[in-house]
Image (cartoon, grey):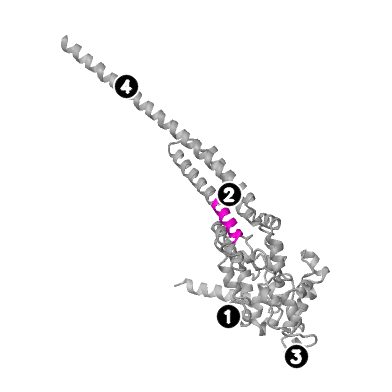
């Protein structure tokens, strides 16, 4: 109880010290860097200030007035929204406004950013439609955000690779979107069912294609007939090499059919299914055509090689359990699988000898491995039989000797 006056005395002293001039941070002291970038605009626009303070623009000392004009040092609306104030820019002015910095070599050199993005945008489907007065097409802020612009490497960014499908899907997916209102298909939903989306989201492959991989970024536009195989060939190099060597490319271009996607789908690209060799050709060539017969032959050859490899793989597992050394067999079987994997891209050449050359080699290697393992297992069985016979005679000899010993003991 005697300590109470002493505690009160300390609290009084602390309060007095805080009240002394210079003991507190002045009310007019500058806020942290991000808040300083927002200036006093955040007093009336707090939600925008919160978004802006997280953005890469605020971190690089871009201010509200850099885009909106006015005076961010005053709380008086007449001054803050005074000379040079732009307010909210019109949608068709947004690309030009962003380019006032992003097309300036002097400003972008330090960040090593390209300065041709506005020019590319003007050539894109978005830019061309915007120039015609379509206010529903995407502008910079639709893809990058308005105040919450983050670098592409930030997982929260709208243009982070895993977020790009959702960003594009805001316009190109669903009946409620702009694309849906125009009667276009739900490209976003189709993409989510594709092997590309499976690679990106389920397997976490950062190199898996997203919308911008095929359509471009600021110069986004759908690839035209004659260019589709070039776009797909960025990733599928072997497939394109065989495809351009075969008859399909020129024939499809002449018929106005987009290459690759005519067989594999547009946004809903399916995984490789070798069995489609037996049926896919009928889609264009009819059920009794020579092309269908050719496809069936290629599928038969592929299936025979795959079966032989599976049988050899099962024998390797048996040999492992014995155990028999199988490292060499496994290496050779991987060689067979490599030939078989190459057979699927080779099918794009639509040339029977090209495919059968690879499947025959795959099947031959698999057959050799299987034959050698059978031989080793056979030798092992023979050795086991010899050992059984040997130990039988040993046991028989022991029994006979013991009987002689017993008889000799009884005679004694």
Q: Nearer the viewer, residue 384 or 173?
A: 384
- Looking at the image, is mark 4 or mark 1 earlier in the sequence? 1
Viewer-nearest of discs 2 and 1:
2
Q: Nearer the viewer, residue 319 or 108?
A: 319
Looking at the rendered image, the quarter that the N terminus falls into is bottom left
Residue 212, compared with residue 244, is above or below; it is below
Q: Which residue is the site of mark 1?
A: 175
Task: Return the mark for residue 98.
Answer: none
Tell me the residue at 47%/34% (across/down). 375
Does the image show residue 68?
A: no
Alpha carbon distance from label 4 to label 1: 86 Å
Instruction: Report the magenta residues as a range.
Output: 289-300
Q: Which residue is the site of mark 4?
A: 393
Residue 102, quarter of picture? bottom right
- Looking at the image, is mark 3 or mark 1 earlier in the sequence? 3
Residue 215, quarter of picture? bottom right
Secondary structure type for disc 1: loop
- Looking at the image, is mark 2 or mark 3 earlier in the sequence? 3
Alpha carbon distance from label 4 to label 2: 51 Å
Q: Which residue is the site of mark 3?
A: 78
Secondary structure type for disc 4: helix
How crowded pointer 1 is (Cα within 10 Å; few <14, some 14-19, many 20+) is rated as some
- Residue 94: percent from left, percent from top: 74, 79
Q: Do the numbered discs 3 and 1 sit on residues whose CB atoms are within 8 Å? A: no
The secondary structure that dominates the magenta segment is: helix
- Looking at the image, is mark 4 or mark 3 earlier in the sequence? 3
Q: Which residue is the site of mark 2?
A: 340
Q: Residue furthest bottom?
A: 78
């Amino acid at each position: 109880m005697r300590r109470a006056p002493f505690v009160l005395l300390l609290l009084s002293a602390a309060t007095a010290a805080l009240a002394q001039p210079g003991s507190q941070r002045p009310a007019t002291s500058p806020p942290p860097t991000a808040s300083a970038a927002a200036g006093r605009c955040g007093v009336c626009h707090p939600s925008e200030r919160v978004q802006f303070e997280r953005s890469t623009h605020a971190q690089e000392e871009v201010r509200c007035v850099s885009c909106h004009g006015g005076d961010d040092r005053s709380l008086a609306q007449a001054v803050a929204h005074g000379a040079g104030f732009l307010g909210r820019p019109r949608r068709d002015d947004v690309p030009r406004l962003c380019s006032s910095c992003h097309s300036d070599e002097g400003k972008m050199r330090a960040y090593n950013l390209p300065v041709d993005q506005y020019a590319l945008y003007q050539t894109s489907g978005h830019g061309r439609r915007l120039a015609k007065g379509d206010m529903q097409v995407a502008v910079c802020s639709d893809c990058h955000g308005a105040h919450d612009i983050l670098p592409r490497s930030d997982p929260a960014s709208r243009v982070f690779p895993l977020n790009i499908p959702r960003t594009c899907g805001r316009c190109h997916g669903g009946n409620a979107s702009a694309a849906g209102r125009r009667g276009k298909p739900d490209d976003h939903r189709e993409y989510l069912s594709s092997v590309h989306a499976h690679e990106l989201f389920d397997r976490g492959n950062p190199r898996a294609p997203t919308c911008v991989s095929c359509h471009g970024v600021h110069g986004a536009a759908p690839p035209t007939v004659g260019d589709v195989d070039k776009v797909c060939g960025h990733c599928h190099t072997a497939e394109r090499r065989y495809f351009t060597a075969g008859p399909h490319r020129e024939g499809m271009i002449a018929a106005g059919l987009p290459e690759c996607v005519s067989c594999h789908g547009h946004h809903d690209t399916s995984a490789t299914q070798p069995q489609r060799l037996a049926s896919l050709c009928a889609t264009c060539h009819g059920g009794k055509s020579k092309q269908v017969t050719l496809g069936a032959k290629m599928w038969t050859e592929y299936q025979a090689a795959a079966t032989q490899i599976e049988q050899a793989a099962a024998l390797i597992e048996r040999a492992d359990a014995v155990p028999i050394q199988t490292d060499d067999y496994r290496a050779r079987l991987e060689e067979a699988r490599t030939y078989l994997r190459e057979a699927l891209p080779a099918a794009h050449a639509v040339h029977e000898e090209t495919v059968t050359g690879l499947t025959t080699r795959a099947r031959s290697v698999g057959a050799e491995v299987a034959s050698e393992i059978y031989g080793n297992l056979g030798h092992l069985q023979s050795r086991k039989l010899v050992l059984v016979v040997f130990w039988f005679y040993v046991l028989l000899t022991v029994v006979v000797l013991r009987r002689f010993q017993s008889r000799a003991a009884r005679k004694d």
